[in-house]
Image: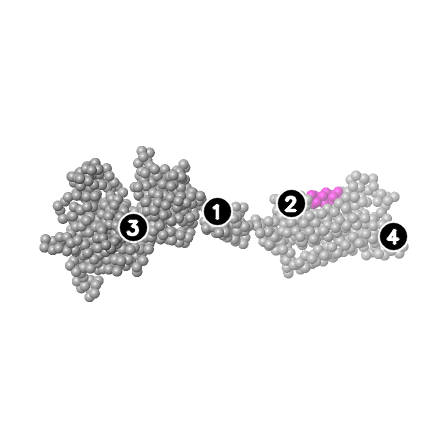
Amino acid sequence: MHKPGDVVLGGLFKVHHTSDFPKRSFTSKPQRHRCKGFDILGFRYAMTMAFAIDEINKDSSMLPNVTLGYRIFDNCLTLIVGLSAALSLTNGQDNQFLLQSNCLGTPPVLGIVGDSSSTPSVAIADVLGLYKMPIVSYFATCSCLTDRQRFPSFFRTIPSDAFQVRAMINILKHFGWTWVGLLVSDDDYGIHVAHSFESDLTHSGGGCLAYVEVLPWESDRPEIKRIVNVVTTSTARVVMVFAHEFNIIHLMEEVARQNITGLQWIASEAWSTAAGLQTPHFMPYLSGTLGIAIRQGKMPGLREFLLQIRPYQNDSVNYGNSIVKQFWEYMFQCKFDLKNGAENGIPYCTGEEDIENMETVFLDLSNLRPEYNIYKAVYALAHGLNDMMQCEPGRGPFSGNSCTTVQTMEPWQILHYLEKVNFNTSFGDQVSFDENGDALPIYDIVNWLWLPDGRIKVQNVGVVKSLVSKGETLTIDEDKIFWNFESNKSPQSVCSNSCLPGTHMTLKKGEPTCCFDCMPCSDGTISNKTDSLMCSSCPQNFWSSSRRDHCVPKKLEFLSYHEPLGICLTAASLLGTFMCAVILGIFICHRYTPIVRANNSELSFLLLVSLKLCFLCSLLFIGRPKLWTCQLRHAAFGISFVLSVSCILVKTMVVLAVFRASKPGGGAILKWFGTVQQRGTVIVLTSIQAAICTVWLVFASPVPYKNTQYHNDKIVYECVVGSTLGFSLLLGYIGSLAIISFLLAFLARNLPDSFNEAKLITFSMVIFCAVWVAFVPAYVNSPGKYADAVEVFAILASSFGLLIALFGPKCYIILLRPEKNTKKGIMGR
C-alpha cells in the first residue's frame, strides 16, 4: 500500500504469516513467492501507520507545508521477504506511481517503521546500517540490537529484552520466587534472553534457574513432551516463557494432553496478550498467567479511520490492491472473483459491506499495544523531520553549519535529529531514545482472568518502567491478581525454604546457590535476618540468645544470696554464729563452775568470740563482689582463724605446762604461762597475721574482676587475690599454727584426764587440718563462684569442727550432767 507525499516513510508488517517459495530453475521463468494465511491484526498494524501519518498531515503544527506519504510492504513473517522489501524501500527499485500531475517517479524513503520481530530486524538493520537508513522497530526486542557499532541506524519504541529480563527479575523478587524454570524460542529472541536471564539473575541475587529449555521451531512432539516432563518433574512452580505464540500453542497442547496444573506461567511480551492462546481449551492451565505486555495506549480517531477502508476508493490513497481485497474477503467470507466464489458456494463481495456491524477483533480497540508502539514510531520519525525542517541556515549540524531541504535531504541526515527526539504522546507517555536507540522502557503487567461466563479478560495489574531520574520502578496491585490455585494466593517457588534468623545458609555441593541447607549459628554468633550467608560474632560482653537471633548481655555469675547454694551457706553461717552465741551465754551463766574455770576460762571466751567471727566472715564471700568485701574477706578470715588457733595453741601449751609443773622441780615453768603471758602470746601470734594482711592489702590488694575465661556465655564476677604470695602466706601461717597445735595436743593426749583438754584439741585439730588439706585442691579446681563456695564451706566446716569438738563435751556436762561439774568430777575422783 502506498500514499504519495513530499516525504515518504516505509513500513514492514506481517499481513500474512506464511510464504511459499517456488522451486528455482535456470530453464524456467522466475516466479514470485506467494504469501498465505491472512493476519487481520497485522493488517490493522499497517493501517495504524497509515492513520498516524494521516493524523500528522492534518496537524498544522507538525511538518507545515510538508506532506507525509508511505509505502507499506508485507513481510509475510519471512526473513527473505522482509529483507527484500527493506532493500526495495532503500534503493527505490519499485513500481513508479504518480507523484504529481506532471511528475512520475519514486520519492525518497527517509525512514522505515519495522520490522515486527527480532531476527528479520537484525538482518535488515545490518544491511540498512550501511546506508544509514533510520529503522524504528515497534516489536523487535532482542538485546543484541543495542550494539550501536553494528546497528548505527536502528531505533525502537519497544523496550529491549534486557529491560524485559530486569522487569521479570523484579517481579520474581516481588513475589519471592527464587526457583524458576525458563523456556525460550529457538531464535535470536529466545537465545539472547536465555543468556541475559542467566547472567542478570545471578548478579542480582534474585534467584536461580531450575532448568533452561529451548522450544522447537516446528511441532516436534517428542521434544515438546520431553520439555513438559522436565517442567513437571522440577520442584519449580513458576515457569517463564520467552517465545512466540505458535511455540506456546504446541507447548500448551501437550500440557493440556497431560492435564498438568499447579504451575504459575509468566509470559513475555511476545505472547502475553496473544488471543490464540485465550481459548477454553487452554485456560484451565493458563488462567492466572502473569505477563509483561507492551504498554497499552489510546488513539482517538483510529476506529473511524478503520471504518473508512474500502476495496474501491477514488482518493489519493491506493487501497485498490490485492491486500485490501484479501482483507475484505477475510472479513466477510466472500470473493471478488465471482467464478471461483460460485464454484465453492462462497458469496460475492460487493465492496459495500458494512464493517461496523461485524463482531471482529479488527475493530476491538480496547487493547492497543503493538499499535501504540507503531504510533509512537511514526511520530518519532515525524518529530525528527519536523526538527530538521526548522533548522536555520548557518546553524545547522552538517558540514559548514548547513541545513537540508525537502528536495535535498538524505536518510542519514535525519539520524542526527532522531537521536534527540523528545516528546509526549497524547496518552501522556514520554518518547525519547538513549545512546543505544532504545526508547524509555515501560511495560504493563497483565493477568489472565477466566470469567464465569466463559469470557477471557487480560487485565492490567501493574506497571514497570524506567525513568531517568528514578531508575526502574515496579508497581503491582496484588489485590487485582487472580491466582489459578485453590488458595487463590501467590504460589511458593523456592528450591530451599528461607533460613530463619538464628541460622545461616550452607550451599549444597553441586547445586545452584538457591539450594542450600540451614545450619544453626554456633554459640556466641547470631544472624538477625532471613537467609544470612554467615553468622556474626557477638561483642565481648555479650552472648547469643537461645534462638541465636540476637545478642544478650552475658549473665553475671557470683555466689549470690538468692540461689540455693548461697542460701544454704548463709544459713549455716548464721547457725554457727547463733551456736557460738548460745554457748557463750551458757559459759557466762556457768562461769564460776569448775568446767568453765578449768584451763583459763578467758581463753575459752576469746575462742568462742573468734569462732563467731569465723562464722560471720564467711558472709563476706557471698553476694556481689565489691572492693571492700574483696579486701576484707581474706583479712577477716585469716585474722579470725589465727585468733582461734592461737587460743587453742596457748590452751595446749598450758596443759603441757601444768603437767610438767606437777612433777618435782617443774614449778618454775608455770611463771612463763601466766594469764598475762597467755594473752600476750595470743596477741603476738594474731598480730603477725594482721601484719601479713596489711602488707598484702597495701601492695597487692584483692579487687573485683569480671572473668570471661571460665565460661563463654557467662561472666564470672570474682575477687582476684592480687598476690598469690600474700594469700599463700596467710594460709601457710594458719596451717603452721594448726600443725603446731595438733602436734602439742597429740603429745599430751595420754596425760591423765584431770585438767586435760588435749584429746579434744587433738580431735579438733585433726578435723581442722583435714578440712584445709582437702580445701587446697578443691579450691584450685573450682571455677568462679564455686571457688568461693569451697572456701566458705572450708571455713564453716573447720569452725563447726572446732566448736563442736572443743565445746560440745563441756556443754553436755554443764547442761545434762551437772553432777560432774565439780572439782572432784573434773579431777576424776
Q: Which residues are magenta?
A: 575-588
Which residue is found at the position 38% from the left and 44% from the top? Answer: 221
Residue type, numbered disc 4: Ser
- Snapshot quadrant of residue 819: top right
* Mark 2 secondary-structure assignment: helix
Q: Residue at 24% of width from left, 60% of height from top?
A: 131
The residue under the point 36% across, 52% down is: 191
The residue wearing badge 2 is 565
Q: Which mark is residue 393?
A: none
Q: CA distance from mark 3 to mark 4?
A: 133 Å
Q: Where residue 183 appears, x then y in whole percent?
A: 38, 47
The residue carrying pointer 3 sits among few (fewer than 14), some (14 to 19) or many (20 or more) residues within 10 Å by Cα, namely: many
Instruction: Give the residue at mark 4.
Output: 662
Q: Is residue 756 visible?
A: yes
The extreme bottom residue here reads: 400
- Marks 4 and 1, how far apart in space? 91 Å
The three-letter code of the residue at mark 3 reads: Ser
Magenta span: helix, strand or loop, mainly? helix
Kindly indicate whether the residue at mark 2 contacts the one at mark 4 (C-beta within 8 angstroms). Answer: no
Q: Secondary structure at mark 4?
A: loop
